[in-house]
Amino acid sequence: MNHKVATLLLLFFSSIALSQTRYVDPVFDSISNKTYTYSIKGRDTLKLDIYEPEMDSLIKRPLFVILHGGGFNSGTRNVNSLINLAENVAKKGYVVTSIDYRLLKKGEYFSCNLPVNRKLKVYSNAADDFLSALEYIIKYKNNFRIDESKIVVLGISAGAETALNVIYNRALVIKNLDRYADIKPAAVISISGALLNADIINNAVPGIFYHGELDRIVPYGKGSHHTCDLKSKGFLMIDGSQSIVEKLENLNASFMFYSYRKQGHNEFDIPNDDIKEAFVFVKDIVFEKKFYQAKIKQ
């Protein structure tokens, strides 16, 4: 190969590399991961996995947190789909953690037959575990090389409910508020999520929301969990994505809201382009301090 051709190839591949944007595109090829025990609560040994890009020279990196779904009675941090997600996000330049949290006892289900006080305890346990995991990571932030001011949380279904309650309704689900007072996520990505009460939101944390309008498990707007009847012992009114976004709009907070007209809950599937837009949003809003509001119906 002559020097002229070699130089042209070098310039070509350099231009490709320059066109890749950290936090939006995969700018790293290799990922390492390791499992840690972050807390032991009763009989539950709670673990988290840390994924980080290899050969990354950045000293302080944003943390991307994944909270799995499963209706609070199933799900785990390390199913194949979440491993793939964590690796793909880490390749964008994030430190990624996928965490386990306490679930319902065997034979219990987060349904219309589960008493409301038990449901609220489940919310509280999951919220406390989520914050305990962040507390653990922040304690070792120099080892993990993270920037605790740039924590982005992605929750799926039950995981989204956990994330949203911690970020917007923390006083309703956590007793020891002082312990976690300094833990303040910078943005949330919610897939089919809801929280206890959107009316009392008073902090304008930016959010990206994906929700099927036909969801009968977690309400799209204000409604009962699992569409429970008023007379059932598990009847609990909560606020879904539509209600949360309305409140954030009133607070002049940044958000993106994807509504899927023909989607429910179980068959929910988000197009790749819609997911990519979440990372563009985070880069613009969290890292570059821009303002943006959008409602997209699919």
Image (tube, rainbow, N blue to C red):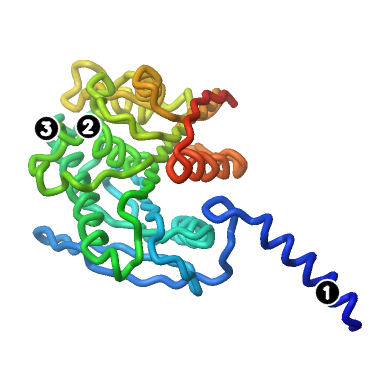
How far apart marks 3 and 2 lie (CA) works out to 17 Å
How far apart marks 1 and 2 lie (CA) works out to 57 Å
Q: Which x, y percent locates residue 99?
A: 31, 57
Which numbered circle lies on residue 7? 1
Q: Give the labeled residue for mark 3.
A: 117
Under tag 3, what secondary structure? helix
Q: Give the labeled residue for mark 2.
A: 169
* Amino acid found under the numbered disc labelled 2: Asn
Q: Name the quadrant containing residue 235.
A: top left
How far apart marks 3 and 1 lie (CA) works out to 69 Å
Residue 174, placed above or below residue 57: above
Q: Which x, y percent locates residue 148?
A: 30, 54
Under tag 2, what secondary structure? loop
Q: Name the quadrant containing residue 120.
A: top left
Under tag 1, what secondary structure? helix
Q: Name the quadrant containing residue 177.
A: top left
Q: Nearer the viewer, mark 3 or mark 1?
A: 1
